[in-house]
Amino acid sequence: MAVTALAAQVRLGALGLRAMQARGFSSDQSDHVQGSAGSVREAGGAFGKREAAEEERYFRAQAKEQLAALKKHHEDEIIHSKKEIERLQKEIERHKQKIKKLKNDD
């Protein structure tokens, strides 16, 4: 099933690339526009500074959320690993008991 999903992604990726090549990029048309159609930030002044501050705040919040998610993921991995260690230790103990029993039966 994974192979068919991969094949489908490859096919769709190739089709998507062909579609982009056929229609071109939107930036190709910007050469025909006289003047600058820049953002508020590029205009400068108080609005530009405010926009820059809002962007910085947004990206700091994004980074904070990503770090929190990564921390949670690692904590979950640690918990899972500890449970797996406990399970394997019980398995080892069980095998040791079987070996001890077999030695006693001899």
Image (cartoon, rainbow, N blue to C red):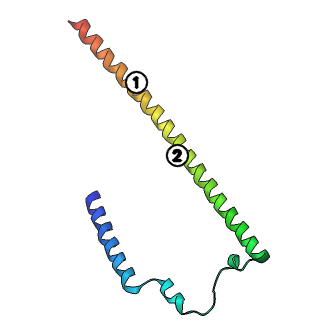
The disc label shown at residue 73, or none: 2
Please tell me which residue is depicted at 42% across the width and 33% down the height of the picture. 84
Q: CA distance from mark 2 to mark 1?
A: 24 Å
Q: Residue at x 76, y 76 (%)?
A: 47
Q: Is residue 103 visible?
A: yes
Quadrant in the rendering for residue 25: bottom left
> Could you tell me residue 63's position as x and y percent?
61, 56
User: Farthest residue in the left direction?
Assistant: 106
Residue sitting nearer the eye, 64 or 76: 64
Crowd around label 2: few <14 · some 14–19 · many ≥20 (10 Å): few
User: Which disc, if any, is residue 47?
Assistant: none
Indicate the secondary structure of the residue bearing disc 2: helix
Residue designated by label 1: 89
Q: Amino acid at mark 2?
A: His
Query: Which element carries disc 1, helix, strand or loop?
Result: helix
Instruction: Report the residue at 60% width, 49% height from top.
Output: 68
Q: Earlier in the sequence, mark 2 or mark 1?
A: 2
Q: Nearer the viewer, residue 22 or 70?
A: 22
Q: Is residue 84 above or below residue 14?
A: above
Q: Nearer the viewer, residue 21 or 82?
A: 21
Position above or below: 17 against 89: below
